[in-house]
Image: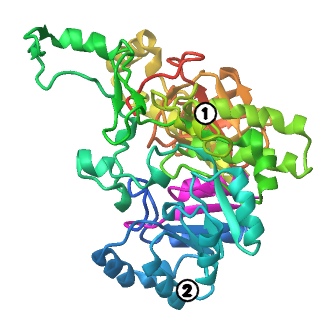
Amino acid sequence: MELVCPAGNIDKLSYAYAYGADTAYIGLKRFSLRIKADNFYEDEYKRVIELKKKYPQKRLFCALNIAFHNHDLKMFLQNLDYFKLYPIDAFIVQDLGLVPILQKEFPGTHLHLSTQASCMNKEAVKMYHSLGFKRVVLGREVSLDEIREIKDACPEMELECFAHGAMCIAYSGRCLMSAYLTGRSAQSGFCSHSCRWEYDLGTIKNEELAIRNEKGGVITAEAAKEIAQSGILRLQERQRPGEFFPVFEGDDFTAILSSKDLCMIDHLADMKAAGVDAIKVEGRMKSTYYVAMVSRAYRKALDALEGKISAEEAAPFIASLEDVAHREATTGFYYNRGDADKTTIGASDSPYLLAAAIGSPYTGEETEKIFAAGQKLLSDREAELSAMHPSARAAVERDLEQHPEKKIKIAEKHEGWKVYPYDALNRVDSGTELEFVSPSVLSQKVTGSEYEFINPKTGEKLDWVNADHDCAIYTGVKIEENTLVRTKDEEFVEGEIRNRGR
């Protein structure tokens, strides 16, 4: 099966490919359901072309899966030349109005039907095949048994199914809740994820007003809260007497609309047996760390399924999914609809923070320049002190004795160590234990004595690093290409998903 992974920006695209995705799907500005993802724009097509050259066997899909209004269609036609700059292998669409346009303007590019089209039966698949679609991304409500029936009825159509990531409580993600509550339409790419919010059942006004019952009694807001948390409330639709839906509020808030995350990594053999040609990971708005770790885990799981590696070799990488931000997991509709109906609370959570990305090592000549810059820094400081009046110099030296942190510290050469670009994403103090993860290295702990942070422009040792700082890491630890650095999140509690809002 093909592994299709998300890429919300150029860096995520690079890591999706490096960590095992066969294919990555992207969105271009304004025409994707993940408008709040970085997406691709301006001259980034040049970097995409270079990535495709680096990974010639990898494919690139482009999501054009919004519901197009007339003005959207006009804007798309005006941007056709820009779209043609990208090496796109397939377009993912839900709006059939785009089909003749794409077939005319991109004759060599495949058409894939988006899950937003809610295609879930064999006759619909046959119809889309007749329209020229190469692949259908089936609606998430379809079961494995139904997938088998569809594949048997239309074997020439490729079937792609979601295997991992956040799920939407709405039908195939076609939700009106965000538009209703916030005026931001999910079908235009502006979903506010209001299904993830936690709702408090209370009175209209924030005060102890009375709700009078038939006998003239009074129910206070506090009493209403007790009733909401008692579990005795239920909904009954007028035309369906006897069908009850529970309404329960626990720990002050209720989450009746927030679905669990999908995770099928332990059931890939069943997906393959059902006729699935490609599995898809959700998450163009997720972090680089998420994209890399999830891509790696599913790559290893698929390699084990295909006999390329053993199940024992794949097991620790599969288990590492627990280190990635996630909610409680479910198998969705694949086996039993009841599994998909269960909701959860809290935001996705992880025991790690992504600290940095490490680049290719500096050349020997570049490294020598870094150390030379450090020596120059020291000599310049010494020249500055020598030029001072003796009393002024003595005052400066006394201050340095009292505040040693002000002294210039430069990196010293260590046998076998190399200097690597360090793209800091979060603050890390020198001496903090780091963990290196890469496409083939599960996790490698690096103690504070095994590395130094240095400024590659000045050669100065750094006590801490942060995003947007000039920084390199100097270490004797062997670092694989595309290595990411993570640190433990000290606020994480094992077995507890922290509530961070959404």
Is 371 in front, or is 53? 53
Q: Mark 2 points at which residue?
A: 106
Q: Can residue 21 be seen in this view?
A: no
Horizontal and vertical percent for residue 13?
59, 58
Report if the CB atoms under discs 2 and 1 are less than 8 Å apart. no
Residue 474 screen position, x and y as percent = 66, 36
Q: In which quarter of the image is the C terminus?
A: top left
Q: Is residue 268 above or below residue 212?
A: below
Label 1 Cα neighbours within 10 Å, binned few <14 / some 14-19 / many ≥20: some
Helix, strand or loop at label 1? It is strand
Pointer 2: residues within 10 angstroms few (<14), some, or many (20+)?
A: some
Tell me, yes or no, if residue 103 can be seen here: yes
From this view, report whether residue 47 is shown above or below residue 403. below
Q: Is residue 225 left or right of residue 245?
A: left
* Residue type for callout 1: Ala
Numbered label tally: 2
Picture coordinates of residue 413, whole percent (x, y): 71, 34
In the rendering, which numbered label is found on residue 329? 1
Q: Distance between the residues labelled 2 and 1?
A: 39 Å
The N terminus - image quarter: bottom right
Q: Write down the region rendered in magenta.
A: 1-30
The answer to which quarter of the image holds residue 331 is: top right
- Taking the spot 54% from the left edge, 31% from the top edge, the residue there is 327
* Along the viewing direction, whichever of 400 and 66 lies nearer the viewer: 66
